[in-house]
Image (cartoon, grey):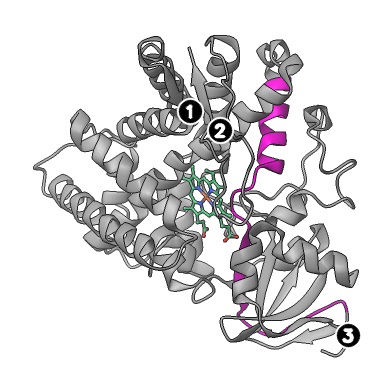
Amino acid sequence: MASIPRAGHLDSSLAFLREGYEFVGRRCRSLGVDLFRTRLLGRTFHCAQGAEAAAMFYHPGRFTRAGALPSSVLKLLQDEGSVATLDAAAHRHRKAMLMSLMSPAALEDMAARAAVALRRRAESWPARGEVGLHAEFRASLGEAVCDWAGLALEPAAQARLTDQLGAMIDNAGRIGPANWIARLRRQGAERDLARRIAAVREGRATAPEGSALQVIAFHQNPDGSLLSEALAAVELLNILRPTVAIARFMVFAALALHEHPAARPGLAEPDRLLAFVQEVRRLAPFFPIVGGIARSGFSWRGVDFPAGSRFILDLYGTNRDGRSWEAPLEFRPDRFLGWAGNPFTLIPQGGGDHFTGHRCAGEWLTIAVMQAMLRVLALELHYQVPPQDLSVDLSRMPALPRSGFLVRA
Ligand code: HEM
């Protein structure tokens, strides 16, 4: 252990909350390392950054997520028994079910619905003066994903669910009352979805063949049993909530478009559209880190780490690591033209393999939806960007431009 430098002698939890996305990177820079130890929440954590660290972290089966996140975050973003907290064969079985929802046809369907919903909402912009793009993207995605997932809700119920999903994302990085209120609202959403699952199972409601609602309702555990209604609702939420969260990436896409107007016409070309989306995902501050606990002992760089060692992988810093990216802080979508791909350098949604590891189940859906919505925003809609505070507070996780990005049609 002696070879791993230590950052701070006291607990760094408050510094982590204060510094947010920059916490790991700052300490790596000042110590001149890509791995250090620190104390968070009263325990020792190893914090690592970069592609080599990502390959170590995403070594199949090495880390469990169970117990790795503080419960204030877990209770809003995942839950006990959900795919993220499973390991080994149980994880692979549940993950295969979620990945079965991500066929190319299903992604195309969801992307098309998101584009239609955004176009329709934008029709109301001229009559509304200034509109906040974050809310507009969120509402469009809520409408699109509820239909795509097979929920077919009345408009009022769908707007309420979208609000509940939004509150879970907004408050995941907070502690105290805002977090507790969002948790209560999450429980309300879970109860409604659990009732819906029960109705589908009992034939009192229908769900389109192959929809998330139908697939999750009838998914069988390896022993042939169905998921409990509560757990099925949790997995459905794990599809709905992060899809609504794509609104945050879309705000950063709108910001990049605003700052790089010359890129706009090129977005008619599929390659350039994809490259732009990848560059937005690389640079946008979203999930700062992922945490894991070693399931058994392993060695890395000549150091033995015992079972139970706690690690934090810096997603934000790895996406901006100068060892992997030329001019890493510059917005240069062209770097992705002809990019061969790499599971450990571009990791805004985790790294490694989607099926055997914990890499985000919705990454392909995120990319497909962003391309479709960006195409509408950049090539079809006309809007002005009035003067406003577009700066981003990096101590707020998840982050957004302070104004929420206002536009006027
Ligand atoms: C909005 C942008 C998104 C971001 C930034 C994001 C980020 C992440 C991250 C960092 C992880 C954890 C990876 C790990 O533990 O190593 C994750 C896991 C996950 N994400 Fe996403 N995600 C997004 C969108 C989505 C979407 C659209 C869906 C579903 C449609 C989704 C479903 C999941 C699921 C089910 C997991 C757990 C996977 C597992 O443990 O195997 N995410 N995501």
**Residue 329 image position (x, y, % from top left):** 81, 42
| Residue bearing the label numbered 3 | 3
Circle 1 SS class: helix
Give neighbour class at mark 3: few <14, some 14-19, many 20+ (Cα, 10 Å): few
Magenta residues, as a range?
272-301
Mark 3 and ligand 1: say if the CB distance to the nearest ligand atom is below 8 Å.
no
Which amino acid is tagged 2?
Val
Give neighbour class at mark 1: few <14, some 14-19, many 20+ (Cα, 10 Å): many
| Residue bearing the label numbered 2 | 251
Give neighbour class at mark 2: few <14, some 14-19, many 20+ (Cα, 10 Å): many
Q: Does the magenta stretch include residue 287?
A: yes
Using residue 18 as the reference point, say whether residue 153 is left or right of it: left
| Residue bearing the label numbered 1 | 133
Which mark lies nearer to you, 1 or 3?
1
Q: Which of marks 1 and 2 is nearer the N terminus?
A: 1
Q: In which quarter of the image is residue 275?
A: top right
Let me know if residue 151 appears in the view. Answer: no
* Residue that appears at 82% across and 89% down: 1
* Residue that appears at 21% across and 54% down: 194
Let me know if residue 291 appears in the view. Answer: yes
Q: In which quarter of the image is residue 3?
A: bottom right
Using residue 375 as the reference point, say whether residue 190 is left or right of it: left
Mark 2 and ligand 1: say if the CB distance to the nearest ligand atom is below 8 Å.
no
Q: Are marks 1 and 2 in contact (CB under 8 Å)?
A: yes
